[in-house]
């Protein structure tokens, strides 16, 4: 395999986009197949590389999806999946309410959903709970990973088993960041002000609606 890797250095590096188990089992065979095709005088090198260029991304995507699905079914801890589902349920109202409000032309702003205490729940409390819930799951997973003597860098970059929790944390923190720090969010509920860097002024704006 080393000789083939030297012959096709770029292609051999691209094979690292495949899951580790798949690359170890089929990597050498893929290099050998490529060599055999290029060594066949009856086949055009241009057509071979064109076919590989078109097929390679789809093949990598298929194997990564398959690998991720197998990992979720067999290796991913139950608490990661459970807390991610809880987090999804907690942040869902934010997206559902804003989507419906947009479809209805901001009519929901005159409903009970825009009362200050209700806004506080679905804009701040629920996303914060989603972040906390999945942060707890990720910390538990990282501690378990450390017990197997994995390096901190590998734990931070190994998303294979922790991506649901990380995804929910990022979404939850993104919502909180928009609510409190992004100037383009007009008073969270629609009034055009630029005081979102000051939560108390933002809250006062909400109460005036």
Image (cartoon, rainbow, N blue to C red):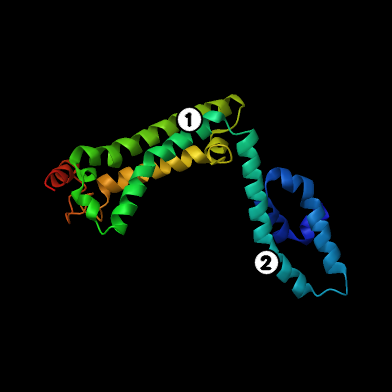
C-alpha separation, residue under disc 1 versus residue under disc 2: 39 Å
The answer to whether residue 172 is above or below residue 136 is: below
- Judge by depth and name the residue closer to the eye, 90 or 53: 90
Residue found 65% across the figure and 40% down from its top: 70
| Camera-side residue of 58 and 112 | 112
20 sits left or right of 165 in the view: right
Q: Earlier in the sequence, mark 1 or mark 2?
A: 2
Name the residue located 78 percent from the left edge and 50 percent from the top edge: 26
Residue at horizontal 35 percent and vertical 39 percent from the top: 127
Residue at coordinates 62% horizontally, 43% vertically from top-left?
68
Q: How far across and how far down the image is residue 16, in percent?
A: 67, 51
Asked which secondary structure carries label 2, the reply is helix
Q: Say whether marks 1 and 2 touch (CB < 8 Å).
A: no
Which structural element holds mark 1?
helix
Q: To which residue does mark 2 refer?
A: 54
Q: Position of residue 139 (x, y in %)?
A: 47, 29
Question: Residue 15, labelled with which disc?
Answer: none
Q: Position of residue 193 (x, y in %)?
A: 16, 54
Left or right of residue 196: residue 52 = right
Q: Which quadrant of the structure image shows residue 152?
A: top right
- Counting every numbered tag in the picture gives 2
Q: Which residue is mark 1?
A: 137
Residue 123 shown left or right of residue 187 in the figure: right
Q: Nearer the viewer, residue 191 or 50?
A: 191
Q: Residues within 10 Å of mark 1 (few under 14, many from 20)?
A: many
Dot 2 alpha-carbon crowd within 10 angstroms: few under 14, some 14 to 19, many 20 or more: few
What is the residue that sits farthest to the top in this orientation?
147
């Amino acid at each position: 395999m080393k000789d083939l890797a030297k012959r096709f250095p770029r292609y051999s590096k691209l094979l690292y986009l495949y899951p580790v188990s798949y690359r170890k089992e089929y990597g050498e065979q893929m290099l050998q197949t490529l060599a055999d095709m290029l060594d066949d005088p009856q086949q055009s090198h241009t057509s071979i590389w064109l076919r590989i260029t078109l097929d390679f991304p789809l093949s990598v995507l298929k194997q990564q999806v398959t690998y991720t699905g197998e990992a979720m079914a067999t290796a991913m801890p139950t608490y990661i999946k459970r807390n991610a589902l809880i987090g999804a349920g907690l942040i869902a109202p934010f997206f559902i309410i804003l989507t419906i409000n947009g479809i209805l032309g901001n009519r929901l702003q005159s409903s009970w959903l825009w009362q200050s205490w209700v806004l506080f729940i679905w804009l701040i409390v629920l996303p914060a709970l989603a972040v906390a819930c999945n942060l707890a799951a990720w910390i538990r997973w990282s501690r378990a990973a450390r017990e197997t003597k994995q390096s901190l860098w590998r734990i931070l970059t190994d998303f294979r088993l922790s991506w649901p929790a990380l995804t929910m944390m990022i979404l939850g923190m993104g919502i909180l960041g928009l609510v409190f720090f992004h100037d383009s969010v007009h008073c969270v509920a629609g009034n055009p002000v630029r005081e979102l860097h000051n939560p108390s002024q933002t809250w006062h704006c909400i109460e005036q609606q």
